């Protein structure tokens, strides 16, 4: 079993790390917290030139059709830098739905623009007091006379809605009972956006749809199975992002433990601190290996029905635990805005809850284990 990356993969990783270091330093992350629509423009432009906006999209529409393992390497670096951008929503989620089931004209119109980064297409999925599964999609799509739908309902936790050209909305076809995807203009009549403030200070919106007309050329039929398949790939990248951030947290915590002195010796010389760090590196190494395995399995054509939720569950739990440990090592300094620890700590909890939370992931893994018994 060879766990080494190829020369090309190492080059990809290093290139993305340099990109993030140059265009998304943590000062930029701080400056963009709770910003209603901005994200790092230079980063976005350079990422487009590197083909990262189209990394999981078909070549015929300007994508690079990158494998999931290579994409996981990219997302690990995004996690290290805490990159604030709509890349996950636009490229990983909306772009993959469009590539899977959109019509030819819809692909021609939108996929090339998503792949180049010219336009952002975000996703509106979760609803107030609803679950993560298909029954949670209750936004009403009533067939309109002459084609299209009239859309009504509420969506929450919609990333970068005000920065997006279109919102890919999961809704329930009231005539057929199935889930449909609707490409909605966020400036359309009947659409109301309200920014939500979160623990991670990222850019999210609640969107109220009040009898919004969606024309037939903005309707994409595919149903919940398409979304579920896209999500299984996406949570591997979410796990990679968490692993990258956990690794970076561990690095600067180890550095602090070596350079910060108490009672005439470095913090790392105290057994309790040393054991904290030993447990942390064990967990991060394990989470990283699980993420790479899930991505590799997907590229090899194997089922990730169990591996993908396992990777997201364990990686996000590890990130949360490592940042909590870091807060203990840093003490009161870790909670001050001048230190980076709190940036990672707050995002760890946010990412743990986003894009399928721990309970839903546990249920998914349990179902796979019990079905195989």
Image: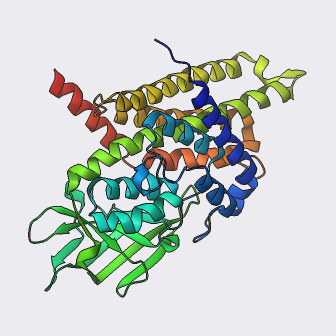
The colour scheme used here is rainbow
Q: In this view, does 357 lie above or below 28?
A: above
Q: Is residue 91 visible?
A: yes
At 23% from the left and 25% from the top, the residue drawn is 369
Q: Looking at the image, which residue sits at the far left? A: 175
Residue 57 seen in the figure:
no
Is residue 306 toward the left or the right of residue 164 in the image?
left
Q: Where is residue 276 in the image (x, y as percent from the top left)?
A: 63, 23
Relative to residue 352, is residue 325 drawn left or right?
A: right
Q: Which residue is drawn at 72% across and 58% down?
A: 28
**Residue at x-position 54% and y-position 42%:** 75
Identify whether 185 is placed above or below 235.
below
| Left or right, residue 17 beside residue 349 | right
Image coordinates of residue 153 in percent, x first then y, are 28, 74
Relative image position of residue 373 (x, y in whole percent): 16, 20
Q: Residue furthest top?
A: 1
User: Residue 345 vs residue 234: left or right?
Assistant: right
| Residue 202 x/y as whole percent | 56, 60
Depth check: 108 or 13 in front? Answer: 108
- Where is 176 relative to 290, above or below? below
Choose between 264 and 126: the one closer to the eye. Answer: 126
Q: Report the label total.
A: 0
Residue at the image point whose x is 65% and y is 45% from the top: 81
Q: Nearer the viewer, residue 280 or 155?
A: 155
Determine which quarter of the picture holds residue 298.
top left
Q: In which quarter of the image is residue 262?
A: top right
Q: Farthest right residue?
A: 264
């Amino acid at each position: 079993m060879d766990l080494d990356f190829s020369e090309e993969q190492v080059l990809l990783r290093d290139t993305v790390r340099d990109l993030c270091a140059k265009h998304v330093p943590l000062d930029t992350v701080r400056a963009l917290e709770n910003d209603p629509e901005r994200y790092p423009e230079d980063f976005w432009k350079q990422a487009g030139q590197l083909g990262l906006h189209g990394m999981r999209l078909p070549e015929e529409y300007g994508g690079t059709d990158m494998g999931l393992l290579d994409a996981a390497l990219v997302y690990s670096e995004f996690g290290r830098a805490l990159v604030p951008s709509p890349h996950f929503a636009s490229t990983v989620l909306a772009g993959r739905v469009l590539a899977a089931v959109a019509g030819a004209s819809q692909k021609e119109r939108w996929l090339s623009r998503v792949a180049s980064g010219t336009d952002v297409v975000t996703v509106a999925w979760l609803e107030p007091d609803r679950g993560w599964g298909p029954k949670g999609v209750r936004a009403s799509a009533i067939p309109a006379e002459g084609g299209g739908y009239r859309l009504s309902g509420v969506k929450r936790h919609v990333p970068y809605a005000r920065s997006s050209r279109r919102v890919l909305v999961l809704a329930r076809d009231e005539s057929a009972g199935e889930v449909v995807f609707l490409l909605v203009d966020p400036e359309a009549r009947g659409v109301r956006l309200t920014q939500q403030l979160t623990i991670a200070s990222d850019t999210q919106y609640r969107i109220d749809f009040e009898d919004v007309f969606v024309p037939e050329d903005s309707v994409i039929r595919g149903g919940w199975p398409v979304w579920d398949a896209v999500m299984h790939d996406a949570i591997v990248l979410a796990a990679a992002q968490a692993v990258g951030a956990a690794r970076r947290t561990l690095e600067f915590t180890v550095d602090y433990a070596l350079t910060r002195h108490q009672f005439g010796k470095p913090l790392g010389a105290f057994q309790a601190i040393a054991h904290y760090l030993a447990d942390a590196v064990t967990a991060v190494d394990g989470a990283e290996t699980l993420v790479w395995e899930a991505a590799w399995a997907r590229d090899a054509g194997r089922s990730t029905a169990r591996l993908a939720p396992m990777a997201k569950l364990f990686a996000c739990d590890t990130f949360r635990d490592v940042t909590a440990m870091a807060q203990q090592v840093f003490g009161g300094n870790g909670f001050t805005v001048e230190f980076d620890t709190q940036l990672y700590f707050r995002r760890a909890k946010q990412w743990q809850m986003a894009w399928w939370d721990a309970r839903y992931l546990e249920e998914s893994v349990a179902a796979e284990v019990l079905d195989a018994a």
